[in-house]
Structures are given as structure tokens and as C-alpha cells.
Amino acid sequence: MRFKPSDHVKLALILCVTIGLTPYYPIPHSYEKLKWLFEGGNGMQLLDYFDLIFHNLPWLYLIIATIYWYKKRQERETYS
């Protein structure tokens, strides 16, 4: 079974809402880690960097899946 490009975008959105934003309160974890990194990253340990990568991979996947979906959609419209 092959996934359609739109299926990848849907999966990426689900991953962003679940893994990319948890914990939701008081602020999303990925935002907190990025803010910490841009403020100099003082006191960050190896586990914090792994956590930063883990919580932001769904967002990267969403960007890649959306670009892939858009290009495939453009190809279909060109050949139609």
C-alpha cells in the first residue's frame, strides 16, 4: 500500500499536535526549548538537545510533506 502525499501531510499534522506541542501547559515544550537555545543555551545538557530535536522533528516533517504534496499536485495539474 502506498501513501498519497496528502496522507503524509495529515500524519505530519497529527504528529505536530501530539509530539510537537506536548506538554501544552504552561507553554509548548518545543517553543520553550527553542527560546532557551536562542537565548544562549546556558545550562542545556545533552538530553535537552535530544529533546529539542525530538519535539521539532514533526514540524520539519510537516514542512517537507507539504512541499512534496504541493509539487505532486502541481505535476498532476500540469499533465491534466
Image: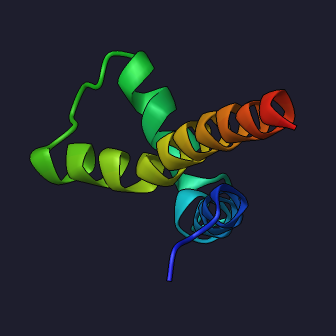
User: How many numbered circles does the render carry?
Assistant: 0
Q: In the visual, does 47 lie left or right of 14?
A: left
Name the spot of residue 54 as percent of width and height, x first: 34, 55
Query: Residue placed farthest to the bottom in the image?
Result: 1
Q: Is residue 79 above or below residue 4?
A: above
Query: Residue placed farthest to the front in the image?
Result: 80
Name the spot of residue 77 as percent of width and height, x first: 86, 34
Name the spot of residue 47 as percent of width and height, x first: 17, 54
**Residue at coordinates 61% horizontally, 71% vertically from top-left?**
18
**Residue at coordinates 50% horizontally, 29% vertically from top-left?**
35
**Residue at coordinates 21% horizontally, 34% vertically from top-left?**
43
Q: Quadrant of residue 23?
A: bottom right
Quadrant (top left, top right, bottom left, bottom right) of the C terminus: top right
Q: Is residue 45 above or below residue 16?
A: above
Name the spot of residue 48 as percent of width and height, x first: 25, 48
Task: Name the residue nearer the viewer: 9 or 33.
Answer: 9
Task: Name the residue nearer the viewer: 6 or 79.
Answer: 79
Task: Name the residue nearer the viewer: 49 or 70.
Answer: 70
**Residue at coordinates 64% horizontally, 64% vertically from top-left?**
4
